[in-house]
Image: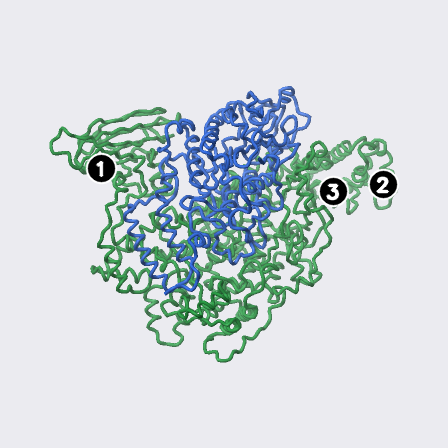
Amino acid sequence: MSSPLPPLSRRDFLRRSGVGLGMLGLSDLLAESKAASSPGAGPHFAPKAKRVIHFFLNGGPSHVDTFDPKPALLKHAGQALPQNFLTERKTGAAFPSPFKFQRYGRSGIEVSELFAKTAQHIDDIAVIRSMQAQVPNHEPSLMLMNCGDSLQSRPSLGSWLMYGLGSENQNLPGFIAMCPGGYPIKGTENWQSAFLPGAHQGTFVDSQHTAVDRLIGNIRSPHAGPEDQRRQLDLLRTLNQAHRRERSDPRLDARLESFELAFRMQAEATDAFDTAGEPQHIRDLYGSGVHGRQTLIARRLLERGVRYVQLWHGAGQPWDHHDNIEVNHRKLAAEIDQPIAALLSDLKQRGLLEDTLVIWGGEFGRTPTVEMVGNTSKLGRDHNHYGFSIWMAGGGIKGGTIHGSTDEFGFAAVENPVSAHDLHATILHLMGLDHERLTYRYSGRDFRLTDVEGNIVRQILA
Amino acid sequence: MNRVSITPVLFAVALIWGAAVPVAQTGASETKEAVKPAPRSGIDFAAGRRLWAFQPVGHPQPPALADDSWSQQEVDRFILERLRQAGLQPAAAGDRRTLIRRAAFDLTGLPPENPTVEAFLQDPSPDAFGKAVDRLLASPHYGEHWARHWLDVARYSDTKGYVYAREEKQFVHAWRYRDWVVEALNEDMAYDRFLLLQMAADQVEPERSPHLAAMGFLTLGKRFLGVTHDIIDDRIDVVMRSTQALTVACARCHDHKFDPISIRDYYSLYGVFKSSAEKLVPSGEPGPANSAFDQELSSREEKLRSTLALRREEQSARVRATIAGHLEAQSELEKYPEEAFGQILYTADINPVFVRRWQQFLADAEQRQDPVFTPWFAYAKLKPDAFAAQSFGVMEGLSAKAGEEPAPLVVQAFATAPSSMKEVAERYGHLFAGVEQQWRELLKTDPSAKALPDPGAEALRRVLHGPHSPCSVPDEAIVNIEQFFPTDVIEELWKLQGEVDRWLIQSAEAPAHATILVDRAEPATPRVFKRGNPLTKGDAVPRRFLEVLSGDSPPPFAIGSGRLELARAIIAPGNPLTARVMVNRVWAHHFGAGLVPTPSDFGQRAGVPSHPGLLDWLARDFMDHGWSLKHLHRRILLSATWQQSSLRPSDPAAWHKALEVDPGNRLLWRMNPHRLGFEELRDAWLAASGELDRRMGGKPVDLLGSQLPRRTLYAYVDREDLSPVLRIFDFANPDLSIPQRSDTIVPQQALFSINHPFPAARAKALVERIESDSADPAQRVQHLYQRLLQRSPNADETKAALAFVQSGPAPPPVAQNALAWQYGYGEWDETAGRMKTFTPLPHFDGSAWQGAEGLPNAVLGWAQLTATGGHPGNDRQHTVVRRWTAPQDGSYAIHSTLVHQPEAGDGIRAFISHSGRGLLRSTRLQQGTEELNVEALPMQRGDTVDFIVDINEGLNSDQFLWAPKLTAVPVTAVAGATDGVRNETWDALKDFTGSAAQPLNGWQQLAQTLMLTNEFVFVD
């Protein structure tokens, strides 16, 4: 018996039914009942970037020790600054950076020795030196940077991208958060989908593992080989097709199809996470540490159409150096400087950098003053949400740019301050989405990642 | 409705920066919506009330229809009328097997049991279905299933979400609320009472009442790092969306953009919750007194109580001793941020909470022209640069004004003119210090003194010690008052509270406890926070109900916080929303969509109901029948509407027409098929395999990391780290009130279904059952179908099933190497060089084999084996053993690297032992690395090699890394041994698996496949 309904193309069908591990965009089956939230499927306009890789230096890297040199601190070393801002803890005198800064590239932007390898690519990078968060505490600032709200449960940037754009590869999760050794502070909330469907949330991967079945849940069967599974799925298809004859519900076909996708995914995901096939010179480029491997896996994922990969530095908040910043920052920077530089080179040589957005940053920066316990200096820095740096490179970014600035000591953004909402608006713009039109109806409101704020930072756009 | 984001601290920052730093961007949130004084309200409530949802529930009569042989219930006539108007006709009735399966899942979330199906199919009486529905409604599983629907709306969780490490993250006995909901539904508690208890059980039930558990509805929300405004916002949101389907939380920053709800309404309700404090109380009879449990509980509670009392008094004393500082702070308020700004505070710091209490106290004092402070206000009006010049005449001026004469002691303190506000503050400080001194002296001689003899001094003493003193810390639990203390005290107090909490959470004997709200002695008069910012307070508003629902001048609440009156306003029979909202929720769960498609939003943008008359008829009928939910279910299930088939209509013309006119099936020209939610799916698998543990209630259990056969309702819900399986299957996000779950189909669901050990284990159990039922293969297929689908297979299906089983499973190449390994523990026999015993580790947690969930655990302490290494058990009798069994005769090489990293402790001992030859290698290792290799070990099939680790002398930092590899060595020299032994490697790391299970056989694969069919997963 033939259906009087026009047959759906497979693509329409997938779009409607939400099939696909990465999920095509806007595929909530309840979309009809939420018809009012009807942002366009796919980008609103031609995107400059198709995918994002975000190095998240959780804990808060110090801007005055990395991308925002402050020679005035040396002049005032050991003296109180004219203005000291309220932060989480008490800080004392000006604390000049123990790291050497140097100019790089044609643009001559100064970068500290901590990121000397990354700095080789400075002409591809736009540094925003005037970022601001809202409070000097990790938890709300992580939420703000990832989800656009310090306290309320809101979908993360990656989830919004999944909702708006979907994944280009149905056989891989479209939004992957990798972190070696376990969760960062706030755990899964950092990549939550909140009121968006659960499939839009980030898939967490503990990149300290090497075996693929430790990396992705349920990717391998412990009780049946592929041939057996094929036989099972063939029988399942036969039974489902017979069942379908008298029925009409797009979910029936969607579910049938989802098993086929799952079957294919087992092979594809295994391949994506396995770096053994990479040539030696590429593996050498990224380095042998866990961050090298994690970054290389990320590149393999991006190549395969994964939309958004977030690379966390480690469990907890490794960059949170309240004491002895000289030793501690040096150690962590050494772990990721080479992988980041390698990724930029590698993307460029593959022609991928032009439509891949690379983001670097933490949830806030650190004070230019030294942290004190009583009268004793800890040789570290406290949290600083008044001003800090992040940088972006690649798709749609004007390289060799500095945007905004902090005051002469690096305490607070003074010129062109940029909020998390502004940053999010800019990222969505680069991905072809208008942050004011990407909305979702929940609890009677059309929610946006940027709430009622967000100005695109046009000065850093190519 | 788009609110300006709540960025109180950003705003604080802007203030801090003052003129020093331009605030172009931070000011942006202010400029978007011009700062203007909030009018009383720009909302036209009279017009707003014209929306259908705010109109009183009517008394509609079901339409009288000609030639209606279809309708069975009043409900049907409403439905049929609309269908006819649209030129559509209802679908045929579903067959009996379909109806009983549908009814069972709809009411109990479980498949019908086969005897139930048979009894119904055989019952010739006209009310056979009615009786079946009654039986299902009487099943205790009804309450379990419908409780979950309510828990979605109530954003239920067993944990608080992210909390700082000092605080226990689990709620005490959250599950008592879950069980209370189950029981209330099972006993068909009237819905108005059901709501009343959830909002105000503390005011209508006696102490220790089990109904206190109902208040988990308010208290089990996210902790929001302890930020009061967000906790209250969550409570307003959950109450108003769940009971009224109004998005009142949209009015936090300004009047609702679409609905007649003002920002004043929001803060009226804010005041209700601000006037309520959280409290952990017993909600059941105490256990036997003087039990070990009880003594320990009392001791922990006493420690908390006495420490809290001490710290409160210390903190108050500190404030009394630093009055000057608190007064000075009033002229630089921007240095004292709101509570969301998490500062680490030390003992000597001026605490922002007290600065704001002083601010409020002074504002009140100014209003009542308190003679102690009139000079303060007068001086505060002077401009700083002209202060010295103008401060001269201030006191004289005041004394001359009737009604503003300052108190005599204060007059004395300002006998000479002060030169700055700082000095004014210092003089007040000095004055108060003197009074405090007097008071202490008096108490020494007369400990029962109530007041100072001099009335002037007494007025000042009351500022320090009176009931409204801005120096005091309220006598409440730490959860309400943590912000009053320095950081180290907060940590200390939470630690003690945690000791109490954990004792109650862990002990089986703990009497029931509930986290409730109680009214504060002094209710707060809320003030509007302009743009939602607590730093910019606007008008005071009375605590009262929503204006749109209570006439033009809503009476203020008069009893305590007003929470009881709020609850009563909600459940009043005249409230136009409460009954409509609930019947719509119930309807939506039975049909897959509501008459109003947005069950938690009945506002302007919700659109009109598909059948307004039916909605009102049901709401009226619901109230007329004592708010009985079971009555409502019966009304719906006995209707012809609900009993329609969900199949595609057999008449193509009718089908085409229906799709054209009403593709979304809002008019209900057929039943919507129902896809099982995760709980139903998992429970149905367990029911089919005969394993379902039907016990009800109790502590939550880890169901997703284990094979426990409890109903999924009892799974531990951790909102901070919700199981990915739950997320993937669209479980309701426990941070948010969820009226309808998403319904997505993604391959992760399929991956779980085919690869996770849980469904596979159910398939095995199911096959075990049918094998014991019958030896005949065709019979077995028949049993499989009955158990899974409540029907017999047709001939084709039987044939396909048998062919599938007969073609047999392919040999499992993946699992084979993994099968060579076993993970166990036992005692090492030093002299024999072999294990005395070997017992498999019983629990796999997803990445490690161990004794039970969690490490250490009560079963086997620290014993653990992972892919890379592990940890020995707590003593030498509990070594951990990775055992490899030779699959073939041959010669094997062993290569392994043992690593022990920690400096602490005395390291570990490790042994390699062969079943035939005994000890092969041994070592003792601390903070080192050692190669433990054997070059060529001849073995026979079935021989074992054990890799054993113990704690050496003592249990301390004994974790190790050790993932041996065995390689088959080609033994070309041995004649005839070339077959079988390939150059194969067994790698402990790569082969590591959580499933020591054998692969599924043909029958098991068949059973698993049937478990995954659409027929199983979709209810017609």
State the residue at coordinates (62%, 25%): A92
Q: Give percent across and percent down for residue B947.
A: 27, 32
Look at chain A in the picture and name its colour: blue
Q: Earlier in the sequence, mark 2 or mark 1?
A: 2
Using the rendered view, name the quadrant where residue A136 is placed. top right
Q: Is residue A239 above or below residue B7?
A: below
* Mark 3 crowdedness (10 Å alpha carbons): few <14, some 14-19, many ≥20: many
Label 2 vs label 1: CA separation?
A: 98 Å
Query: The C terminus of chain B lies in which quarter of the figure?
Result: bottom left
Local secondary structure at mark 1: strand
Chain bearing tag 1 is: B
Q: Amino acid at mark 1?
A: Thr
How was the colour assigned to the protein in this rendering? by chain
Residue for badge 2: B398
Q: Give percent across and percent down for residue B597.
A: 53, 61
Residue for badge 1: B885
Which residue in the rendered view is the most extreme toward the bottom?
A: B67
Chain bearing tag 3 is: B
Label 3 vs label 1: CA separation?
A: 81 Å
Specify whether A250 is left or right of B931. Answer: right
Look at chain B in the picture and name its colour: green
Q: Earlier in the sequence, mark 3 or mark 1?
A: 3
Q: Give percent across and percent down for residue B642.
A: 45, 68
Which mark, residue B362? 3
Q: Amino acid at mark 2?
A: Leu
* Mark 2 crowdedness (10 Å alpha carbons): few <14, some 14-19, many ≥20: some
2 and 1 marks in contact (CB < 8 Å) = no
Tag in front: 3 or 1: 1
The foreground one among B878 and B428 is B878
The foreground one among B808 and B518 is B808
Specify whether B759 is left or right of A181. Answer: left
Local secondary structure at mark 3: helix
